[in-house]
Amino acid sequence: MEINTGDTAWVLASAALVLFMTPGLALFYGGMVRSKNILAMLMQNFFCMGLVSVIWAALTYSLAFHGTGKYLGDLDLAWMRDVATTQPTGFALTIPPLAFLAFQLMFAIITPALITGAIADRMKWLGWVLFLALWAILVYAPVAHWVFSPAGWLFKRGALDFAGGTVVHVNAGIAALAAVLVLGKRKGWPHHPMPPHSLPFTLLGAGILWFGWYGFNAGSALAGNALAAQALVNTHMAAAAAMLGWLIVERLKSGHATTLGAASGLVAGLVAITPCAGFVAGMAPIYIGLIAGALCYLAVSLKFRFGYDDSLDVVGVHLVGGIVGSLLLGLFADVSINEFGRDGVFLDGGWGLFGDQLVAVGATIVYSFVVTFAIVFVLDKVIPGGIRVTEEDEETGLDQTQHAETGYAFERV
Amino acid sequence: MKLIVGIVKPFKVDDVKEAVKELGVQGLTVSDVQGFGRQRGHTEVYRGAEYEIDFVPKVKIEVLVDDGDVDRVVQKLVETARTGKIGDGKVWVVPVEGVTRIRTGESGPDAL
């Protein structure tokens, strides 16, 4: 295929947009933790931009996107060998391979960053560094290969995931659950209140996420064309509707429409539309957003019922939102939007696509849960003193004990 | 000499300050404090999870006065800080053994 400059420009810009989501996510989460842990939260997120990028160059880009294996790619492009001249396997791109490498890297960065919201306030810095490296290689690379690479078994099966409903959100969401099951609850949870220390940060972060998500979803068209425009409009409408869906249920159930509810609702909508963005049209994104906003609001209370401390609701928003979006795609998908898509139930495509979506979601859940659980379990055994900070360090806060810094150095006696 | 300690609603601080100044009080100290009385705390809801916030923000006002001024100042403080609703706060008076002005070394009522 010939290189198209318009397509290239849009994908390069999208890579920058998606990169910006990680600092946005850092603020979104950072505002929700207690003030003694703000820097640790920002750091866990920012560090993904460092470590995951280097691993991507050395290893994981090749594992995810080159090679014809059903379950994992090969190492032909490892160590940046021939990456500028070799197409990712099975793609017929109109952009330079390096634009694709950069764009996909940003997804690999933000996916493990999502997990930080669940494990907030209690993991050792060294634990996070080792976890991140292992997870990027053992979980992200294979799952991305299954779903995004035309050689992958879920892609071949016909499961659809436009921009990462399973690869990013279901994957990170179920990993978050596995991690907190090994890690345990924060000291004092749920009896001791741990309200957000800066909701203005959280809202700023949510705004950055919404902005960056246009690159995430519309960039996944890998072209500057009508499909990209459709994906951008779908993304926007789903976020808007999900904010309304969350706030309506919240107002009815707890009496107030809250700022945290608005931020959480719009993110839930963005999550749910991610797999669907290039496969649906019309009012579908609004229905998907409304459903996701309402369901995710109900889902964040599950942790109290089952007693797992998913601190900032990665399970409630990303796992549930990702499942809702991936499955609703089986109903709303419309092949007239995208020739590489399929028709869902509502377009008389039958239940075939829905079934394949179930398989993709189920396979991601099982694989990611098992491997993530094993990674955290093993690290907890091999790190001296365990992967968790001591009770005293947890009480003092991760900023001081893990990074020797203070987030808010107000002058006081 | 006595120390008058008042716990009042934050929005009443300016009114109280102006009122006791009119009585000739030369100085006072304020600090942000938290606590609970009969008002108890309040409830905040984050993502559907309710948190009881037990401690309500208040302002503590401390005024040093000569024995003869105690009743007037306390009465003025109570009048000014009262809204009639629960959570108006409290005032109490404690004896003071000695006071010294650091700049001049004056002590006793002269230092007030």
Image (tube, coloured by chain):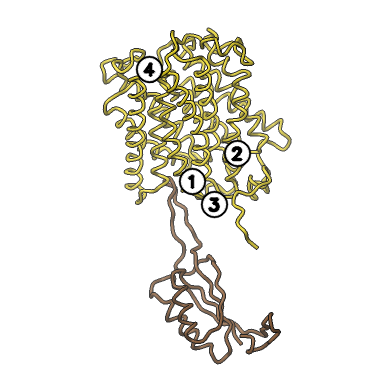
Chain colours: A yellow, B brown
Q: Nearer the viewer, mark 1 or mark 4?
A: 1
- Taking the image as shown, residue B101 lies to the left or right of residue B57, namely right
Count of labels in the image: 4
In the rendered structure, which disc, 4 or 3, sits on the residue that comes first in sequence? 3
Q: Which mark is residue A43?
A: 2
Check chain identity for marks 1 and 4: say if they share one.
yes
In the rendered structure, which disc, 1 or 4, sits on the residue that comes first in sequence? 1
Check chain identity for marks 4 and 3: say if they share one.
yes
Disc 1: which residue: A201
In the rendered structure, which disc, 4 or 2, sits on the residue that comes first in sequence? 2
In the displayed image of the protein, which residue is found farthest to the bottom?
B68
Q: CA distance from mark 3 to mark 1?
A: 23 Å
Q: CA distance from mark 4 to mark 3?
A: 43 Å
In the rendered structure, which disc, 3 or 1, sits on the residue that comes first in sequence? 3
Q: Residue at x 45, y 35 (%)?
A: A209
Amino acid of disc 3 = His
Disc 4: which residue: A355
Q: CA distance from mark 4 to mark 2?
A: 40 Å
Q: Nearer the viewer, residue A333 or A227?
A: A227
Q: Residue at x 50, y 66 (%)?
A: B36
Q: Residue at x 71, y 84 (%)?
A: B105
Write down the quadrant of residue A128 in the picture. top right
- Taking the image as shown, residue A82 lies to the left or right of residue A244, namely right
Disc 3: which residue: A192
- Counting other residues with Cα less than 10 Å from the Cα at mark 2, is it few (<14), some (14-19), or many (20 or more)? some
Q: Quadrant of the C terminus of chain A?
A: bottom right
In the rendered structure, which disc, 2 or 1, sits on the residue that comes first in sequence? 2
SS for tag 2?
helix
Amino acid of disc 1 = Phe
Disc 4 + disc 3, Cβ < 8 Å = no
